[in-house]
Amino acid sequence: MSGNYHLVNYLTYFDTLGVARQTGLPVSVLQLNATLRLRLGPLFFENQVALQQASEEFLRLPVLYGAHSLYLQGMIFKKVMLTRFGLDLRVSGDFTPYAFHPLTGQFYLQNTPTEAWQPLLDAVLAFKVRKFRFLFRLENILPVFTNQYYYLVAGNPIPQMTWRAGVSWQFVD
């Protein structure tokens, strides 16, 4: 369990018309976090849940946020390669998201619609051999099964299913 308290003075934001505004008031954000990690042999279950509340309505945050991972992890190929295979789930509670103005490249306040629960599910396959790492991630796989779009920004759906690959190789200690 942990908690955070953030205090920001003179926060600049863009109102519903896209006009830059600055607050004369300090804006505070209170966050309470709970983390739980369970292990049963090679099976891991990691959970993080956050409750958060901003003191002003123009700082839009979901009140409830969760990040959960369920994966198998172990050494393979004569215990040389660390392998991880599993699922990552991120869930955010009801909130009114920002809108995006592509011409100015700014996020601004909007009052409709309020987004319901937003589940985002990813499948992950990762390998590590000494200083070489490889990652393959299939992102946002739920819409394939539900035929529903999810929005973190008003009017801009998250791409349905995409994949991402990454390579990292350290040459120096």
Image: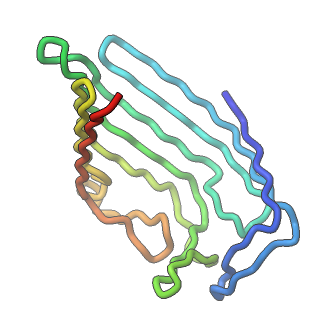
Up-down: is 161 above or below 22? Answer: above
Q: How many marks?
A: 0
Question: Where, quadrant-wise, is the C terminus in this rendering?
Answer: top left
The structure residue drawn at horizontal position 32% and vertical position 19%, both measured from the top left corner, is 43
Residue 16 x/y as whole percent: 66, 83
Residue 14 x/y as whole percent: 66, 79
Left or right of 144 on screen, residue 150: right
Residue 171, quarter of picture: top left
The structure residue drawn at horizontal position 69% and vertical position 74%, both measured from the top left corner, is 13
The structure residue drawn at horizontal position 65% and vertical position 51%, both measured from the top left corner, is 63
Residue at the left extreme of this rendering? 77
Question: Where, quadrant-wise, is the N terminus in this rendering?
Answer: top right
Residue 11 x/y as whole percent: 76, 67
The structure residue drawn at horizontal position 44% and vertical position 66%, both measured from the top left corner, is 151
Q: Nearer the viewer, residue 81 or 27?
A: 81
Give the colour scheme shown. Answer: rainbow
Residue at the front extreme of this rendering? 172
Q: Nearer the viewer, residue 5 or 97?
A: 5
Q: Nearer the viewer, residue 60 or 115?
A: 60
Residue 46, quarter of picture: top left
Residue 167 x/y as whole percent: 24, 43
Left or right of 109 on screen, residue 144: left
